[in-house]
Image: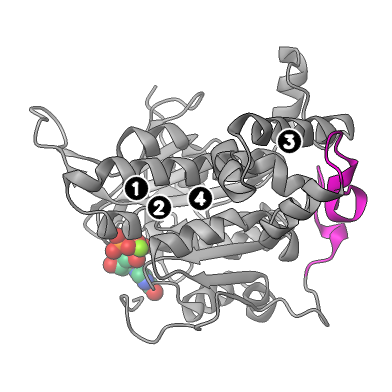
Amino acid sequence: MVEKRNSERINDEDVVSALSSESPEISDNDLESKPIPTIIDDLDIQDIPGIGPTTAKKLRDAGVLTVMDLAVTSSEELSVEINSSKESAAAFIIAAQQLLRDSNLLDKEFVTADVALEKRKSLLRCTTGSNALDKLLLGGIETQAVTEFYGEFGSGKSQICHTLCVTASQPVENGGFGSGSIYIDTEGTFRPERVDQIAVSRGLDPTSVLKSIAVCKVYNSSHLELIVKDLGKYINDFKARLVIIDSIISLHRAEFAGRGTLADRQQRLNSMLHKIIRLTEIYNISVVITNQVQSSPDTFFGDPTKAAGGNVLGHASTYRIYLRKSGENRTAKMIDSPYHPYSDTKFTVTEKGADDMEEETSSKRGKLKE
Ligand code: GTP
Ligand code: MG
């Protein structure tokens, strides 16, 4: 069983990478489909029409180093950082996005639906480690999407996250992303030993799996916001196609307690989540977030628990899955999705991480109720 929080922290560094530069486990050739753009080498911020050396310096001073950084920032944030009007900040961002479009690094603003369908076919999916859970997700977690797992303590959220960073390291033909992953741990529950155990139980080389995961221990909500702000850089550095934030809300929830601070909390969560959504699309990555539950006293029928974070989180997640414990097993229910049927399934947690239940492996695995 995985130890609970606050015992031996893994490392005090902001971002601890096991990916050493001398022995990269994941080569560029492993990354299939749309490659993570090597924009830093290809485009310069001064290639953007309207940005000269003075503005470029201001941007650099504000930590905006690449066209990609500029394209994913928000006008409110940028206007404060470079001390400009919101309008000119917005104009720089739009110009950066336009340059990415012109360089075919970002999709055109309007495409016909058949092109959109073709694009969706090229999305990558990564297995969760459980066939039943994969079936619920119609093949696993997707790139260009935010997948949220929420549920009470012990419902398996962190176990799914640990399993996903093992499976993501596997080649695309084996159901992985063939990539590195970034694990942002806000609760102190990441355990490398557990990753090692999951990898060994699945017959994988634990050393190369461990080397593919960059772990970042986050201490407070401002720290989390800062990491998210610079996430584009880390995604490139670690060749990550999967970013896990376990959990997205705990720090904000703890620090912004009480009604008076709720609006501020929601606003900060909102801007962080919007940045995350832009990152999934621009970098073609998958973001998995975990969330807690809160009781909803106004519910007269059915389950009185609901996801924390209100509408801000609800709208940010492309897919929301509600996890519940039922004895040794877990139930996963698709709560919100633009195209999945509303369905539920059962899975369990074993030494292999998220896994199928014994009887599920043989027969009625992942029964879908439309
Ligand atoms: P909170 O973070 O507290 O909200 O919960 P969570 O949903 O993240 O729970 P987590 O994923 O950590 O699940 C914990 C549960 O997973 C434990 O109660 C065990 O049932 C199970 N579990 C954890 N580690 C192991 C393990 O090594 N082997 C097995 N078989 N089960 C494990
Ligand atoms: Mg957890």
- Do residues under tags 2 and 1 come within 8 Å of each other at their CB atoms? yes
The image position of residue 30, as x and y in percent, is 82, 59
> In which quadrant of the rendered image does the C terminus lie?
top left
Q: Mark 2 is on which residue type?
A: Thr
Residue 100 picture quarter: top right
Disc 2 residue lies near ligand 2 with CB under 8 A: yes
Q: Mark 4 is on which residue type?
A: Val
Q: Which residue is mark 2?
A: 290
> In which quadrant of the rendered image does the N terminus lie?
bottom left
Image position of 135 with respect to 131: above or below: above
Label 3: element kind: helix
The mark closer to the camera, 4 or 3, is 3
Q: Mark 3 is on which residue type?
A: Phe
The mark closer to the camera, 3 or 2, is 3
Q: Earlier in the sequence, mark 1 or mark 4?
A: 1
- Do residues under tags 4 and 2 come within 8 Å of each other at their CB atoms? yes
Label 4: element kind: strand
Q: Identify the residue shown where x is 48% and y is 82%.
A: 10
- CA separation in Å, label 3 and label 1: 37 Å
Residue 327 picture quarter: bottom left
Q: Which residue is mark 3?
A: 92
- CA separation in Å, label 2 and label 1: 6 Å
By secondary structure, the bulk of the magenta-drawn segment is best described as: loop
Q: Which mark is residue 85?
A: none
Q: Which residue is mark 4?
A: 288
Residue interval drawn in magenta: 26-52
